Amino acid sequence: MEHKVGHESSVTEQTLELTPASAKAVAAAEKEISAAVRQLTQRLGGAEDRLRSFAHEIRTPMSALLAYSDMLRRCEALELSQDQIIDYGATIHEATLRVLATAERTLDEHVTDERRSRSDGIDFREFANVLLKTFAAQADSLGVELKIDIDDHFPELNLDRVLLDGVLSNLISNALKFTPRGGNVSIQARVDHRDDAIIFVVSDTGRGFPADVLLKLENGETFVSNDGPRGWGRGLKIVRDHLTRMGAEFEVSNLDDGKGAIATIRFPREAIA
């Protein structure tokens, strides 16, 4: 019996002594496992980030759905005309389509693990009209004038509709949040004929960007503000990501008089259909 135990101990010791080839194989396996764990962690982190961005992006059209559906619910008390009821219904329909488009894009990117810009023919006057109606109720409740100025003969665009909507919606939403009652938010759509470029400018008469936020943006940093729903971080991160995918330049600054902020987007000539 004692001999048997000793024999088992000897076998165990021999088993634990790996040959150089085995040790190399174990090290390679450990390296592959570590790489797989890192990749899984990155993918899970990316999925969480996409989920946060999705929740942020549907907030604007969902707010429009809530505001206009509430007015329709109280149509008799508000004495809405038939034309107003039809108009509000159309705005609800458009907001619903925007939520659906954003949801489908998010799901598609999650399944394919690809994030790319697509090409859609966009009549910007129609696009801007829908955008303005989306924010009209919010701007009215805040006492802020929302206006848009589009160059004559502005061309049809060849851009990703979902991404462009996300960019302008986030910029307008931020501008409205930081503009006091009696102020205004302006969207300009310009054509740079010299360089065949498309330029969008979103400006406001609010308090402007804090110095630390401007510095981070100028350095190309992405960040998430700790200011809660009043912060800039998530929205501006989405804007930068979307514009990078569309090959556009982005710049933010404060107005010279210190009374407001301005965001400028520049698309190359390829954006023109």
Image (spheres, rainbow, N blue to C red):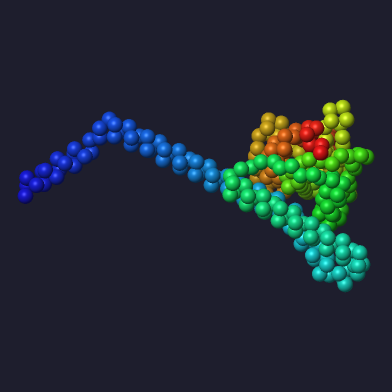
**Residue 40 seen in the current view:** yes
Q: Is residue 145 left or right of residue 163?
A: right
Q: Quadrant of residue 72?
A: bottom right
- In the image, residue 58 sits, relative to residue 19, either above or below, namely below
Residue 226 placement (x, y as % from top left): 65, 45
Q: Is residue 56 left or right of residue 186?
A: left
The number of callouts visible is: 0
In the picture as drawn, the residue positioned furthest to the bottom comes out as 76
Residue found at x 58% / y 44%: 113
- In the image, residue 133 sits, relative to residue 206, either above or below, namely below
Q: In the depicted view, which residue is nearer to us: 22 or 256?
A: 22
- In the image, residue 5 sits, relative to residue 23, either above or below, namely below
Q: In the depicted view, which residue is nearer to us: 259 or 264?
A: 264
Residue found at x 35% / y 34%: 27
Q: Is residue 231 left or right of residue 42?
A: right
**Residue 254 seen in the current view:** no
In the picture as drawn, the residue positioned furthest to the top comes out as 194
Q: In the depicted view, which residue is nearer to us: 119 or 43?
A: 119
Residue found at x 87% / y 65%: 85
Image quadrant in which the C terminus is located: top right
Residue 194 placement (x, y as % from top left): 87, 27
Residue found at x 81% / y 62%: 68
Q: Quadrant of residue 186?
A: top right
- In the image, residue 31 sits, relative to residue 89, either above or below, namely above
Residue 178 placement (x, y as % from top left): 79, 46
Residue 74 placement (x, y as % from top left): 83, 70
